[in-house]
Image (cartoon, rainbow, N blue to C red):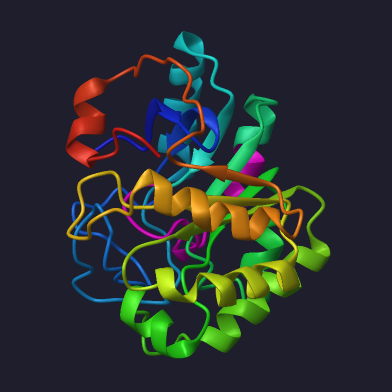
């Protein structure tokens, strides 16, 4: 499995070249979200460690950038990106190679850790997950590791927002399990104050059925009433792009992000 994949056509980030610092056939994550396209998390974890070498990533990044110029380079892949402990070195390495904006797609679970906040603070864009308004719904939808609480999760996001000078987006996956809590989620998001709210529903292969376009439009209006900047998976335009290795994306089940 390659460390670098794509670029993919992303409704959130444009032409996105993915960097996977986990590269595992088995998902490595701190959550076991109901809707995850990667399937079940066999065993959740919050222990940060090294999975792949920065040397391997560097070689693949250099080769990829000879063939494509993405809008953004995104840390994502086969689990929670911040679970790796060499991400900071990866960021520094890529910065020496390219001035393309760097992003991460994170489930927010480790943002209560100072070392994680300091690492992702070096990025240009942070897309953080927030699917629930309280502990009960948090456990139902995200099924977090036993060491993670909803309160700490939210505190971590708030602490990071105060220190981050880049773009912080909150992505919310709406489904039947949380649609009735949309107003509570809006209040919580408003209190955090992200630069962008990304309104999502499971359109990719998922055990969870997506909400309709009309349902998402009604939810989006709730955020817009409070003058929040929003984008939606149903209406956001995706740029045309051609992946360097289509089979790599198929194997990852990552045809879009």
How far across and how far down the image is residue 241, in percent? 41, 15
Vertical arrangement, residue 200 with respect to residue 108, above or below: above
Vertical arrangement, residue 12 with respect to residue 119, above or below: above
Side (left or right) of 229 relative to 134: right
Highlighted range, magenta: 77-93
At horizontal 25% and vertical 60% (from top left) the residue drawn is 27
Among the 4 quarters of the image, the one containing residue 234: top left
Image quarter in which the C terminus is found: top left
Name the foreground residue: 174 vs 14.
Answer: 174
Q: Is residue 79 magenta?
A: yes
Inspect this view and state whether residue 82 appears. yes
How far across and how far down the image is residue 122, in percent? 72, 50
How far across and how far down the image is residue 229, in percent? 70, 47
Name the foreground residue: 20 vs 150.
Answer: 150
Image quarter in which the N terminus is found: top left
How far across and how far down the image is residue 141, in percent? 34, 74
At horizontal 19% and vertical 32% (from top left) the residue drawn is 250
Q: Is residue 186 magenta?
A: no
At horizontal 39% and vertical 44% (from top left) the residue drawn is 213
Q: How many marks?
A: 0
Inspect this view and state whether residue 105 appears. no
């Amino acid at each position: 499995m390659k460390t670098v994949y794509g670029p993919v056509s992303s409704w959130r980030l444009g032409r996105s070249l993915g960097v996977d610092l986990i590269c595992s056939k088995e998902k490595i994550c701190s959550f076991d979200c109901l809707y995850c396209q990667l399937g079940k998390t066999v065993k959740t974890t919050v222990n940060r460690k090294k999975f792949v070498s920065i040397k391997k990533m560097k070689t693949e990044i250099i080769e990829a950038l000879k063939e494509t110029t993405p809008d953004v380079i995104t840390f994502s892949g086969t689990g929670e990106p911040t679970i790796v402990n060499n991400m900071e070195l990866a960021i520094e390495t890529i910065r020496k190679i390219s001035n393309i904006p760097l992003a991460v797609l994170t489930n927010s679970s480790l943002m209560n850790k100072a070392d994680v906040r300091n690492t992702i603070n070096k990025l240009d864009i942070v897309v953080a997950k927030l699917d629930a308004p309280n502990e009960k719904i948090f456990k139902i939808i995200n099924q977090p590791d036993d060491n993670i609480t909803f309160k700490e999760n939210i505190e971590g996001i708030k602490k990071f927002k105060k220190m981050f000078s880049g773009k912080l987006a909150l992505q919310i996956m709406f489904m039947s399990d949380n649609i009735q809590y949309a107003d509570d989620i809006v209040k919580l998001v408003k209190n955090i104050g992200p630069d962008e709210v990304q309104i999502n529903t499971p359109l990719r292969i998922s055990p969870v059925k997506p909400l309709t376009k009309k349902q998402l439009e009604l939810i989006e209006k709730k955020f817009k009433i409070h003058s929040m900047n929003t984008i939606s998976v149903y209406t956001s335009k995706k740029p045309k792009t051609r992946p360097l290795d289509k089979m790599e994306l198929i194997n990852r089940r990552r045809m879009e992000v």
